[in-house]
Image: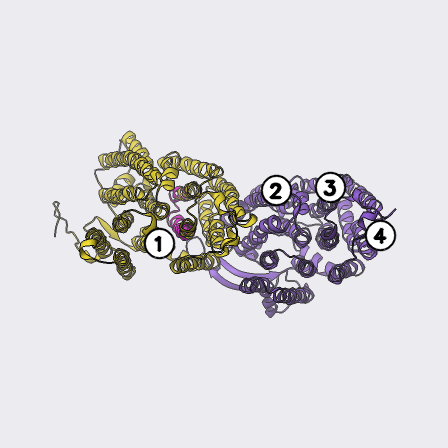
Chain colours: A purple, B yellow
Amino acid sequence: MTENDGYFLIALIVLPLLSAVSLMIIPSKERALIVGLTAISSLVMFFVSIYVFMAYSFDGSTFQGVMSYPWVENVGLLGENGISLKVGIDGVTASLVLLTGIVVLPGTWVSWKIQHRLKDFFILFYILTAGVYGVFVLLDLFFWFLAYETALLPMYLLIAVWGSTRKEYGAMKLMMMLMAGSIPIFVAIFALFAEVGLGTFDMEVLLSASKDEHFQKIFFPLVVIGCGTLGAMFPFHSWSPDGHAAAPTAVSMVHAGVLMKVGAFGVVRLGVQMMPEGALFWGPALVALGITAALYGAISALRQTDMKMLMGFSSISHMGYVFVGLGTMNVIGMTGAVLQMTAHGLMTALFFLLIGAMYDQSHNRDLPNFSGLAKQMPIWSVFFVFASLASLGLPGLSGFIAEVHIFIGAFRSYPIVGGLAVLTAAITTTYLMRALAQAFFGEANPKWDSLNEMTWIERSGAAVLVGAILLLGLWPSPWIDRIAPSLSQIPGLMM
Amino acid sequence: MTDIFGQTLNLNYVLLLPEIVLLIFSMLVIGIDAFKRQLNISGNVPVGLALAGLVVALTLSILQVNMDEDFARLIQVDSFTSFFRILFIAITLVLIVGSHEYIEKSVSHVGEFYGLLLLATVGAMLMASARELLTAYLAIELLSFSLYIAVSLARSDRRSGEASLKYVLLGGVASASLLYGLSMIYGVTGATQYHEISAVLSAGDTGLTTPLLLGLVLIIVGLGFKASAVPFHMWTPDAYEGAPIPVTAFLSATSKAATIALFLRWFGGPLLPIASDWQFILSGVAVATMVVGNLVALQQVNIKRLLAYSSIGQMGYMLMAIVAVGSGFGSDATSAVLVHLAGYIITNLLVFISVTHFFNQTGQEEITSFKGLAQSNPYLALMITAGLFSLAGMPLLVGFFTKFILFQAVVSAGHLGLVTVAVVASTVSLYYYLMVVRQMYLYEPEDGTEQWRLSLTGYVTTLALFVSLVVFGLWGTPLYAAADAAAAGMF
């Protein structure tokens, strides 16, 4: 990446914010203008994300495209470069930026059919997007946390105003749990600044500064609990099914697809990269929590009837793999964890897009109410089966490549956990097949004869995600070549 | 000129010009209002005079920014003083411009009301600039007495009189306690000048531990009352609820800020040598204030009471930073308090002025009456939401930046435990702010979706405050630099 590519990283934050501001000015009656503007800006973000991902290539320096503007310095507590607007990405964030670009594009498309206050929806949606991009590209802890909170806050209104099924309850529960999750992060950030004592929030400086081992052991779990809440880590996951069930389609897509990855990424950046000794110490606990979540989520998913609840628990299970991978503390396992973030993000976004496409017509998501949908909505069903296959880890699709890495990493460090992880994959197959058998095959229920096939917009959105899933599944090396070298820079990591 | 001890006194009256101008204008406003029928002058003259006085005083204060000089060893005009002078005058200015319709409609004795606001501003300015205990005490009383009356001036609202009476009685007790405490300090050290007290106390053991501690406790009680610190906060919700809304705003902004200024002057100056004696008391008070303020706010149904408890919670954060001042972290902690104070005031003014306009239109102040405001007046709903989110310390707004700096200062001074409580409390606060936001955005208005607009001055003031909310939220450098310069004047 050349130095000037930093402008593209800044553009990733500025574009969605600019779109949100322009939307504020457009009168809400002008639907065509709103649709046009969001179409352009989501497409531009999509291509900039791809460019940024392609431009990154590991060449010895972890962070690339680094650009820094001093913001607040040499006053009070703050010394040189106290707070600076600093951007830059490593291999992990390069792949997550790409994921965000891919998910936001179809997320924008499927939201165009919203009738109620479309403009306000997109304003909040793009503020959220700006926050997500910010978390990935910002390299200053003050702005990092600012972006983190910016990504959370719009969720409340997005769910409470545009959601369904107990939306107020779901929104408030999600909001309060995620905000409670930022308490330990907030505290850990302050402690980190004070511990390093250089008067700067520059993350590159903080990453390379030496930190006391006891300090790392105390504050690593705080970061894991805080970011883990957003990553739906067991036992801080209970907002996830309720929140997902209540959220509107695009919000579910972005939330499960990207926002949960922000949490897991927080564990990587603030946890493992910032406090490697703490991570080594607490690694086993992370693996234990991860595998518990994987099993617990999968077993709970067996009993769900609401499709979105099913996906909520399935997400908990899949995010469990991520934490197993992070806890292995070897490069293969951690690479798998980051791949799993991307894979799960794509796959779950596809699921929520499909569920939304059906729910908008039927206003019903209960699996027992459906049967033989494959006859009524054949194309929709093909997509759904494809998503299920990706989710259960069929070779050739994205889930496989990620899970294989995690399993190998887990077997290296904790063989028993590796075994349990494989068992989880089997349970995953069971609940997905059960859902498919119940709703898609068998006699068609005449009650649902009126259901229409997906619109062309929805098909294109699904196709984008399917393409990405296939690409990652069949040709994962662009991802692995970027992720693995960046992670191998973490001190104390086994190969 | 020399005093009775033969020391030369600096009687440079220029130093007091902002205060003198405000005093003259307050008398003019009250005087003219008394004779407005006989003189046959329009109703706009009092507000015009008040604004003119404020603008002149503001200009003079800005001209004196770089001064560091004392007046007769009673008043110190330094950067700390200038910071608060500008802040206080600006608050009054914004309040009057933003809510003059309310004042003309819902306040009895309009002229006296403006005059009292100016007098209270002078009191607050003197509190920040005093360098001697008795001057500080007189300044407190000037502020308090003006406010005792102003609280009672809500037209046709019986709660107003009740609120005023409660405030007077409890305020009197607090003042007595404060004065008694000051007399103890004087008794122990034999001085009322801050720097002399500091010198005596840092010279070593005075041998009079009991009266010193008693004095400290009494001072904390007295100031704690003014700052609405728990457990001396009981008057706050009643006074806030009964007072005319601009006075409530004044109580939550100027009165609180002046008290914090005094806290900083006293606990960062004369009382700093005995920090170990008061730090644990203030820690306890700060924790109680943060916890009680934010928890009790959860069950409020009246917006003014809600904001009262929320401001109690906010005072807890600042008291926590006073503890950090005692940990040899004076200048950094002070600038952090000042920056948070400024951010809090901008935010609070935005919320209160928005609520004032809401009340002008609807006559309601229950939280449920905000139902559907996002449809009947989306602009005002956005203003209130931004203000509440900023109070909760949400990003993109000034509250996030200032809270971040404040908490960081306290952690750097070694009080991680206190900050943990503060962060938890501030998360709780988000819940009750969201309850208001929920009413505005999730529900339909009860009486149809009839759109209404603000007055021009309403738009101007709220928009100006909103813009500074966002600008300082994203680029807090000027605010922090000003606060840092002010703090540097003290240490």
- Which residue position is annotated with label 2? A169
- Which residue position is annotated with label 4? A374
Looking at the rendered image, the disc whose residue lies closer to the viewer, 1 or 4, is: 1
SS at mark 4 in the image: helix
Residue B183 spot, x, y in % from top left: 23, 35
Crowding at dot 2, Cα within 10 Å, few <14 / some 14-19 / many 20+, comes out as some
Tell me which chain the residue with mark 1 is part of.
Answer: B
Tell me if label 1 and label 2 are in contact, CB under 8 Å. no
Crowding at dot 3, Cα within 10 Å, few <14 / some 14-19 / many 20+, comes out as many
Q: Earlier in the sequence, mark 4 or mark 2?
A: 2
Looking at the rendered image, the disc whose residue lies closer to the viewer, 1 or 2, is: 1
Q: Main secondary structure of the magenta part?
A: helix
- Which residue position is annotated with label 3? A297
Tell me if label 4 and label 2 are in contact, CB under 8 Å. no
Q: Earlier in the sequence, mark 3 or mark 4?
A: 3
Which label sits on residue B101? Answer: 1
Q: Is residue B475 above or below residue B135?
A: below
